[in-house]
Image (cartoon, rainbow, N blue to C red):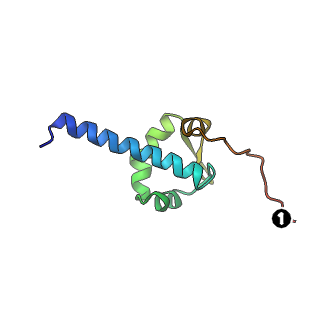
Amino acid sequence: MMNLQHMVHYQTFLHQLVYVKINAVLVEKFSGGPVGLESLGVAISEDARTIEEVYEPYLIKEGFIKRTSQGRKALEKTFAYLDVEKPDDNDQVDLF
């Protein structure tokens, strides 16, 4: 049977896993964003409201992501943490 201290450590561990998962998906699947909250939720199999209310405040406070009018965007700290090169923001696809 888990005591309260073990339960708190376990819950903290689970939250850390979700933080890493959000950052990894944001970078690897969405190239750092911006990405909508619903799309991010679907990609990590988590309710968008839970992301917004539970995980996002920590990630914003710690400087991993930011909210923009287009969606959530990974910051430099996220790429450094995951040891991934940040794509150039000026990369645009030529349509014509």
Question: Measuring 44% from the left and 44% from the top, which residue is drawn there?
Answer: 19
Residue 89 occupies quadrant: top right
Q: Residue at the far left: name it.
A: 1
Q: Residue furthest bottom?
A: 96
Residue lying farthest to the front in this orientation = 83
For label 1, count other residues whose C-alpha is less than 10 Å away and answer few (under 14), some (14-19) or many (20+): few
Closer to us: 83 or 67: 83
Could you tell me how many numbered marks the image carries?
A: 1
Spot occupied by residue 25 in the image (x, y as percentages of width and height): 53, 52
Give the SS element for disc 1: loop
Residue reaching furthest right?
A: 96
Please name the residue that numbered disc 1 is placed on: 95
Q: Residue drawn at (52%, 48%), measured in percent from left and top?
A: 24
Considering the image in quadrants, where does the C terminus appear? bottom right
Residue 13 appears at what percent x and percent y? Answer: 33, 40
The residue at the point 11 percent across, 43 percent down is 1
Amino acid on which the number 1 mark rests in the picture: Leu
